[in-house]
Amino acid sequence: MQDAMRDSNLKATEYFEVVARLGTVTKAAVELGVSPSAVSQQIRLLEEQFGVKLFRREKRRLVLTLDGDRLFQTTTQAFSAIRNARNAIARQRETRNLTVRVSPSFGVRWLGPRIGEFAAENREWNIRVDATPDFSAFDTEAVDFDLRYGLGSWTGLTVNCVLHDLVLPLCSPDYLDELQQVSNHPVEQIAAARLIDSVKALYRWDLWLASNRIELDELEYPFRFDRSSMSIEMAKQGGGLALDSVTQCLPELRRGELVPFSTAFDVIDFPAYWFVCPPRHLNRRIVSRFAEWLTRKAAEHDAEARTLLTGFGCTFRPESGPELIEVVPWRL
């Protein structure tokens, strides 16, 4: 029987499974969309191939023999698994899904408040946002594109800059008053400040201090967070001085909950957020549509952020990336 199984006709085996499951040739023919005679012919071929009887007739029903039942137990599980996989594939094909992977803080603070607009314009699509610091492995994961935080050096992929980081020390108005009571000199104010460190930021306090030629007796961080959103919240509550990007906290600046620490230092301006995907993914209309929408919203944000900072009296220092930052004297 094992030798016969290796050479068995898949169609005949499928017809057998349906007949055994439904109990009659007529019902099986309806499910399979063929004539009853075609079903009977395939059953005879399978019995001849195995050299055994698979059914015996009892009144108007076909009842499995011992050999038939043994074959049915195996084939019904196999064909059930195939049917389930086929239905799942069909449902996935019919459902319109867009999957985006994004860094957590950027997802919560920037993309989250805006993506509802895109969803409203594309109601026929299901949108999944996967907020994680891990980049997608596009060859093995079903992700349409990443919104990555970094320096843009990812080979073999389409990489387009979405937004710049506009980095400067920020704090609450009350905390700024507290520092100004210590001294009128910004360096002495920094020396007295509680520094809030965003440990995963591209541009951190040690780099900022070095680039502005500021030396502290001891660099300490009373607060260290692995999410910019937490650093910003701590600064907003008056907990200290955060070195972070306006990309993450424009609403707080607009409402006056955060203010620039000092206009004596340039705003560090470098590309940091990127639209990343394999080139073939842009052939999906929904992906290219999202990229166009994202470019438009990012331009609106960037214009507002720069206008707001200019209104505070801030100036900008463009950089290609933290590893290329030039040390320049600061102005008092």
Image: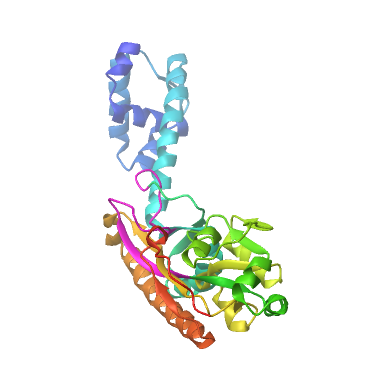
Can you see residue 279? yes
Which image quadrant is residue 328 in? Answer: bottom left
**Image coords of residue 46 (percent x, y):** 31, 21
In this rendered view, identify the residue nearer to me: 262 or 84.
Answer: 262
Residue bounds of the magenta highlight: 138-166
Task: Describe residue 169's horizontal placement relative to residue 164 as left or right.
Answer: right
Of 55 and 72, the residue lying toward us = 72
Residue occupying the point 44% across, 23% down: 74
Q: How many marks?
A: 0
Q: Residue at 47%, 62% (x, y): give it.
A: 127
**Residue at x 37%, y 60% (from the top left corner):** 324
Q: Position of residue 311 (x, y in %)?
A: 51, 88
| Relative depth, front residue between 286 and 95 | 286
Q: Residue at x 65, y 66 (%)?
A: 191
Residue 184: percent from the left, percent from the top? 65, 80
Q: Which residue is at the front of the view, 73 or 306?
A: 306
In the picture shown, does residue 224 fall above or below 184?
A: above
Q: Is residue 51 visible?
A: no
Q: Is residue 144 magenta?
A: yes
**Colour mapping:** rainbow
**189 in relation to 61, above or below:** below
Confirm whether the magenta stretch covers residue 92: no
Q: Position of residue 91 (x, y in %)?
A: 42, 52
